[in-house]
Each structure stands twice: as structure tokens, then as C-alpha cells.
Amino acid sequence: MYKTSLYGGLFAAFVSIPVISQAQATLGAGLIAVPQFEGSSDYRIMAVPSLSFSNEKISVRTVGPGIEMDLLSSRAVDVGPILRYNFGREGSNIDNAQVSALPDIAAGIEFGGYAQVNFPVGGFKTFLSPRVSAVQGVQGGARGTQFEASLGLLRLQGDWTLGARAATTYADGQYMKTNFGVGGGNTTGLAAFNAGAGIKDAGLALFANYKINERVSLTGVAGYKVLMGDAASSPIVSVAGRKEQMFLSLSVGFNF
């Protein structure tokens, strides 16, 4: 099953910049194609729901298998908590025989927070948005900490909202050992590997939202990232997978 870290700063932070004066909610559903595990060369297509709610004080939105809340009413700064579900790594859901034979990583919960600043560039239709976030595994096999830094560009153009975001992730030793380490004496044919803390990945995502009418909109996201450091050197990736990772999503939203 896919992991929340496949999204990271790439998928997050494509948010509605303008402040609204009344409550608004969006319900949606779509399809997403993601690697079967972090570093996999095999992909899985799944249906995913989406939800967002905003008023003049706060906003709440789903980001992949998680929820983010913006606690500030200002469109210039977004700050709030992150709660994510990490699906772990279950051998029965993995096509690669070597990785599927490794010990499963139990699903669990990650908790953290983020801060984002939105700078208008050339008027109030284009925004430059640096963002930082941190999440800590607090339950199940989702142990370890990840720090993400990203820079986004968002353009409001008629019925279109277009964006791009570049991001990089640092992961601590516990996260890296859990997801990229290989124990000695395993029977998978993969060499033992002790993964250490460091920059885990860097990538870019492109975003487009088209408002069909006042009630219905379509959203597409395409992302690409490259695993780096010990993540790329792990035999889970270098032998049984690949360091280049992609994801695609297409969804429809209904505004209320």
C-alpha cells in the first residue's frame, strides 16, 4: 500500500489562497496512481476521497490519506496541524518477491504541523509560497520523523488554477532504518543495509484545477521525485525497485 511520504510537500499546499467571507465545503473523489512502496518500480491505482471546508476563521482539507488544518484567517500565512495515516508496507500488496518477503511495516499515525507564507507576485493572481513541515510517527510502524521544505507557485487564471511545487525531505535515522534498512541473515537475496539519517528525496509536482461551473471542478496532479542518499542506495530501491518515483491523480469536486 502507498505511504503518505510519497506525497509530502509535493502534494500538499496547493490550497485556495483567497479568504472567503462565508462557509464553503467541497466533497470529491478520484483516482490516484502511486508506487506500491517507497522506492517501488510497480504502481497501484486506487480510489481516494477528498474533503475541504473553509470559513473566515479556519480551513480543513484532506491531503492524500491525511488531514491538514489552517488555523489563521489571513491569506498571507497558513499555520496548523497535520494528521496522517501511514499505510505501512504489507508484503501481500507488493508484486516484487524480494520486498514482499521482508518484514511488514505496521500501519500507523503520523502527527505534526506546517507553516506556509503566501507572497503575491505581480498582483493578487499569482502567489509564491514557501512552506516547511514536520511529521512524527506516533503509533504503529510509522515511527521516525520527516522534515519537508518546499517552494510553490500558484496562478489564478479565470476558471483555471495552476501551480507547481518543488520539495525536498529530510528523514531521521529511525524512519530510514524502518523503510530502507535490510536486516542481516534475511532470506530475500537482498544484502544487509543499515540506512542512516539524511536528505531522502527531492521532487517537483504540477497542479491544475478547472472550474466547470459554480458547483463542479476537476483537479489533476502529476508528481516526480528522486530518492537520494541512503534511500537510493538501499537494495530495496537499487536492486528491487528504482529511485525515480512518480504519482498521478485526477479527481472531481462538488462545491456546497
Image (cartoon, rainbow, N blue to C red):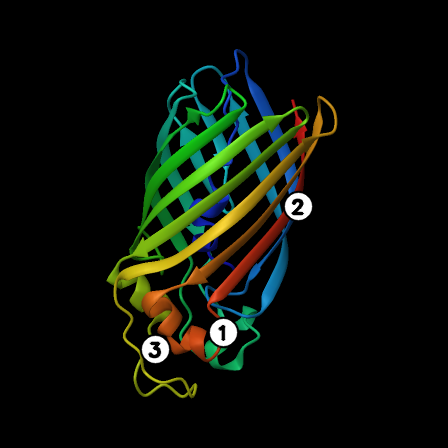
Q: Is residue 178 visible?
A: no
Q: Position of residue 135 (x, y in %)?
A: 33, 47
Residue under label 3: 182
Where, by quadrant of the figure, is residue 202 drawn?
A: bottom left
Label 3: state its secondary structure. loop
Label 3 crowd (10 A; few <14 / some 14-19 / many >=20):
many
Q: Give whichever of 157, 104 is nearer the camera.
A: 157
Residue shown at 54% from the left, 77% from the top: 96
N-term mark: 2 or 3: 3
**Which badge, 1 or 2, is on the more N-terminal residue?**
1
Please report contact status of discs 2 and 3: CB closer than 8 Å, yes or no: no
Q: Quadrant of residue 41?
A: bottom right
The residue beneath circle 1 is 241
Amino acid type at circle 1 is Gly
Mark 2 → mark 3, Cα distance in angstroms? 35 Å
Left or right of 113 on screen, residue 126: right
